[in-house]
Image (tube, helix red, strand yellow):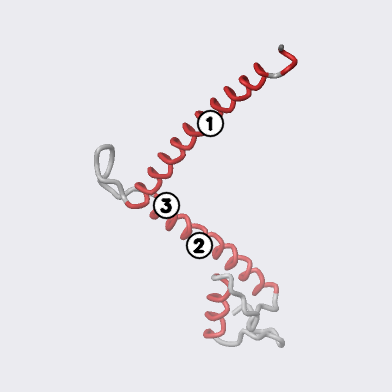
Amino acid sequence: MAERGAPDANILSASDAMWWVYVTITTVGYGDHYPVTNGGRLVGIMIMTMGVGLFGTLAGFIANKLLAPEEGTGPGGKEGTAGAGLAAIQDALVEQRRQNERLQDRLDRIEQQIRDRSPERR
């Protein structure tokens, strides 16, 4: 309706409008159809804003589903695949920290032995 009266409009039918909305809201933006009037551009601003919100929300739901443990699980229960994966990563990080601390202790001892044997101390 916003583009109906414009002589240079390229959104001429409901089909064109639906195509433009879909291509715009999915952020594909082929550029084959676009609004040329201020009213059409205002509708475009709203559609683009809704598209960003829609896909941001969708991405959040998907990420939450992939990273959250399955329902009904808890301490002592079987964790979901993603939860088990995160737990394995956390365990690996804890073990890596322990190994780093042991290595640092060994390096400190070696440095101390080198200092103790240096010619300046004799």
Decide which of 58, 11 is in the foreground and name it.
58
Question: Are the residues at dot 2 and dot 1 in contact (C-beta closer than 8 Å)?
Answer: no
In percent of width and height, residue 8 lies at 71, 86
Q: What residue did someone put label 3 on?
A: 64
Q: CA distance from mark 2 to mark 3?
A: 15 Å
Specify the quadrant of the image occupied by residue 115: top right
Neighbor class of circle 2 (other Cα within 10 Å; few <14, some 14-19, many 20+) is some
Find the residue positioned furthest to the right. 120
Q: Secondary structure at mark 3?
A: helix
Q: Secondary structure at mark 2?
A: helix
In percent of width and height, residue 19 lies at 54, 81
The quadrant of the image that shows the C terminus is: top right
Question: Are the residues at dot 3 and dot 1 in contact (C-beta closer than 8 Å)?
Answer: no
Check the image and report above or below for 5 versus 23: below
Q: What residue did someone put label 1 on?
A: 103
Q: Secondary structure at mark 1?
A: helix
Q: What residue did someone put label 2 on?
A: 54
Q: Nearer the viewer, mark 2 or mark 1?
A: 1
Q: In screen coordinates, is 116 left or right of 92? A: right
- Mark before the other along the chain sequence, 2 or 1: 2
In percent of width and height, residue 110 lies at 59, 25
- Disc 3 residue type (three-letter): Asn
Specify the quadrant of the image occupied by residue 107: top right
- Disc 2 residue type (three-letter): Leu
Specify the quadrant of the image occupied by residue 106: top right
Q: CA distance from mark 3 to mark 1?
A: 37 Å
Q: Nearer the viewer, mark 2 or mark 3?
A: 3
- Mark before the other along the chain sequence, 3 or 1: 3
Q: Residue at x 48, y 34 (%)?
A: 99
Q: Residue at x 44, y 36 (%)?
A: 95
Check the image and report above or below for 57 versus 17: above
- Disc 1 residue type (three-letter): Leu
